[in-house]
Image: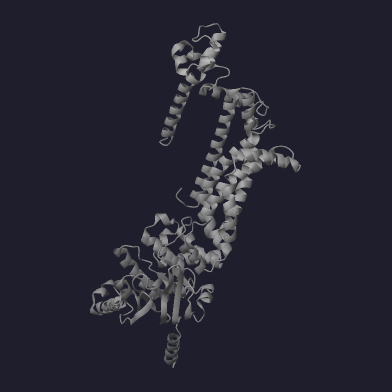
Amino acid sequence: MQDVADALVADHSALKPVISADGLDLTFQTNDGPVHALSGIDLEIGKGEFVSFIGPSGCGKTTFLRCIAALETPTGGSLTVNGMTPDEARKARAYGYVFQAAGLYPWRSIEKNIALPLEIMGYSKAEQAERIARVLDLVELSNFGKKYPWQLSGGMQQRASIARALAFDADILLMDEPFGALDEIVRDHLNEQLLELWARTEKTIGFVTHSIPEAVYLSTKIVVMSPRPGRITDVIESPLPKERPLDIRDTPEFLEIAHRVRDGLRAGHAYDD
Amino acid sequence: MRNALPVLAVLAALVALWYVAVAPMNIRGALDVAERSGADVIPAESRARFETPVLRLMLDNADHIATGYSLDRPRLPTPGQVGAELWKTTGEMALKGRPMSKRSLIYHGWITLQSTLWGFALGTALGMAGAIAIVYSRVVDMSLMPWAIISQTVPIVALAPMIIVLSSQVGIEGRGVPKAIISAYLCYFPVLVGMVKGLRSPGAAQLDLLKTYSASGLQAFLKLRLPASMPYLFTSLKIGIAAALVGTIVGELPTGAISGLGARILIGDQFGTPLAIWAALFAAAILAGALVTLLDVLQRLTLKRMGMQA
């Protein structure tokens, strides 16, 4: 009986998406005329999913992420986050956002950088300390809390910025090419860590990337996008298991998905000049 | 010590150049003195000497060049003479227990310093307030900024007497207030420009980050813009305090002022006592150097405390 109830609850939450876009449009008015950054985006992201957005520059993947974060305002269609408008969700502090550059404040130690959102949101000193310790442990930076950003490597800085986004209780983590500037080896390591972190925290993650292996390795759902106008060309539900060692990237299943992503990217470029 | 060496080398070169320059600058004066004491000089008449180039005079009267290094009223005093005068009007008077005598440069320096600090405080406050208004309001940015720039194109020597006359007209007694206003007028501009740049230094991503926390405008100012502007602020303050000192001295120049380093320079000029002018000039330079150094130390301490690489 309990099992049935659990299944019903699970079903119910699966039915109710965390992020839902319906016919989303965004046109920027520029001096050279209108630019269709996003056109007819339909997408649903369920709770606990890891969704990657992949596509060439100008396909609107970052713009879509920024729409979810209410940093851009769509010009058409509808978009809800946790059943609210993106702006309401932003004010309710529904998500943590990790930018391409770590963007740590040079005048704050790593601890104090992580404390920044907590100070703004009015957490007590004791709770701040407790949360800082927890997220530093989560990104394996426990011994670096007192250091300043310039004393850390690029990869460590980016981990600190992820910790900062995890410090408050947002269920959604939006990441805009967080590992784009890092070398391959560091990136592999951080990808592994990110999967672990996702499994432990059960957050819903939106992840923008340029890299096909990264997208396939990390995601439960891969959204392939193409430019002019920015639109979705393919949505791939990954059949890979949740448990993913790095060498899963050599399995036929992995290569098959990677192949499909590549096809999707190529299709988007088919009528490119 | 490694930093001091190049500075000291330049200083030594400047002092050497100065000593060399004293000879041609003072040769006419030296020959006048020699003539009066009955020595033979070529040419013998003062008028004829006036029309002879200095190098000619030096070649023909090599014996008298040395006299130029110990004149009472030299065209160009030697560094030694300036140093001695400076000591006589500062340290020596302090040792005699009269540091605040009207003839002491400590007294005049103190008068100048007070006005400078008032002007600096006023100018810094105005500059910071203006910068905040400019950064937060596009209207203010477009209306105030051009005037701020124009204000600095008006020569302060033209403006200073007017400020003094007008402030006495509205019943302000003494020189203190108008001097501080003139000083603030010069000082606010570098602070304004530096702070505008500093407050605008956070990038779009850093502002977006605060937006994702739905931080208030005040939080964004206190936690991001203000700390980000600190390095810019200190650089501006260092320029500002030097400008404030110049402003005060200019404010002391118009006739009527009797105290302050500027007044000493003017009086020295009127009474033909070049040593007094040079001593006051160096007192002003030393004061400026001390103030800038003080701010530099403050900057290092602050930035170090903030964890930034200074």
Q: Tell me: residue B157, above or below residue A44.
A: above
The residue located at (61%, 29%) in the rendering is: B265
The residue located at (68%, 41%) in the rendering is: B163
Residue A126 lies in what quarter of the image? bottom right
Q: Tell me: residue B195, above or below residue B160.
A: below
Kindly tell me whether residue A129 is visible in this rendering.
Answer: no
Residue B110 lies in what quarter of the image? top right
Instruction: Residue B254: give x, y in percent of width and height.
Output: 66, 34
Count the labels in the image. Answer: 0
Instruction: Residue A217: give x, y in percent of width and height.
Output: 31, 74
Which color scheme is applied? one colour
Query: Given the current orientation, which residue lies at the most extreme right position?
Result: B171
Instruction: Residue B132: give x, y in percent of width and height.
Output: 58, 56
Q: Tell me: residue A188, above or below residue B233.
A: below
Q: Is residue B250 left or right of residue A78?
A: right
Kindly tell me whether residue A150 is visible in this rendering.
Answer: yes
Instruction: Residue A199: give x, y in percent of width and height.
Output: 38, 75
Looking at the picture, tell me which residue is in the foreground, A75 or A140. A75
Q: Is residue B305 left or right of residue B108?
A: left
Q: Tell me: residue A228, above or below residue B65.
A: below
Q: Which image quarter is the N terminus of chain B in? A: top left
Looking at the picture, tell me which residue is in the foreground, A75 or B248. A75
Looking at the picture, tell me which residue is in the foreground, A155 or B130. B130
The residue located at (55%, 14%) in the rendering is: B47
